[in-house]
């Protein structure tokens, strides 16, 4: 009966090394204010969980960001979700997409480079996971 609210996914490749991407994301509180770790694996992978309150969805929104080392480049996967599936305004008015784009924009401005291969996935769910890689 109760599902999750609308979700959005983004995948992008930045032409910078892993550590620079991690540093920028650690400085953006809405990407990392709940949890952050770098896993002990090769290639290196960092996991960020952030959250923020949104008046538009009358509730809390969550973001999970994966950072994957790809040699001299770094892949970023962002999934955001509004946690109020039955908001009085209906849906989330694009706020889950906006949150994901905010994280991507903070990376772009913090790194001073544009990503390539950007993929946006509306109404993200597990059946669309393959679209993010």
Image (tube, rainbow, N blue to C red):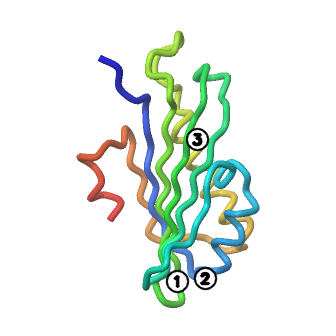
State the separation of the CA atoms marked 1 and 3: 25 Å
Q: Is mark 2 in CB contact (under 8 Å) with mark 1?
A: yes
Would you name the residue on which mark 2 appears?
16
Query: Helix, strand or loop at disc 2?
Result: loop
Instruction: For marks 3 and 2, give the CA distance.
Output: 24 Å
Residue displayed at 61% across by 82% down: 16
Snapshot quadrant of residue 21: bottom right
Q: Residues within 10 Å of mark 1 (few under 14, many from 20)?
A: some
Q: Earlier in the sequence, mark 3 or mark 2?
A: 2
Disc 2/disc 1 C-alpha distance (Å): 5 Å
Q: Of the two numbered discs 1 and 3 on the same chain, state the one appearing first in sequence.
A: 1
The label number, if any, that marks residue 11 in the structure image: none
Q: Is residue 66 left or right of residue 131?
A: right
Quick one: label 2 or label 1, which is nearer the N terminus? 2
- Residue placed under numbered mark 3 in the picture: 98
- Placement of the N terminus among the 4 image quadrants: top left
Which residue extends farthest left? Answer: 127
Q: Is residue 54 above or below residue 112?
A: above
Q: Residues within 10 Å of mark 2 (few under 14, many from 20)?
A: some
In x, y percent, where is residue 7? 43, 38
Q: Image point 50% across, 73% down: which residue? A: 39
x 61%, y 19%: residue:
58
Other-residue count near label 3 (Cα within 10 Å), few / some / many at <14 / 14–19 / ≥20: few
Judging depth in this view, the residue of 65 and 128 nearest the camera is 65
Q: Nearer the viewer, residue 37 or 97?
A: 37
Residue highlighted by disc 1:
73
Q: State the count of labels.
A: 3
Quarter occupied by residue 51: top right
- Whole-percent x, y for residue 32 in the image: 66, 55
């Amino acid at each position: 009966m109760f599902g999750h609210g609308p979700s959005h996914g983004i995948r992008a490749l930045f032409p910078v090394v892993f550590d620079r991407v991690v540093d920028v994301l650690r400085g953006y509180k809405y990407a990392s204010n709940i949890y952050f770790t770098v896993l002990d694996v090769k290639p290196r992978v960092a996991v960020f969980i952030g959250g923020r309150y949104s008046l538009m969805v009358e509730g809390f929104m969550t973001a999970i960001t994966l950072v994957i080392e790809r040699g001299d480049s770094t892949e970023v996967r962002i999934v955001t979700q509004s946690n109020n599936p039955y908001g009085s305004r209906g849906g989330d008015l694009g706020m889950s997409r906006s949150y994901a784009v905010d994280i991507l924009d903070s990376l772009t401005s913090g790194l001073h480079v544009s990503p390539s291969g950007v993929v946006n996935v509306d109404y993200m769910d597990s059946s669309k996971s393959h679209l993010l890689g």
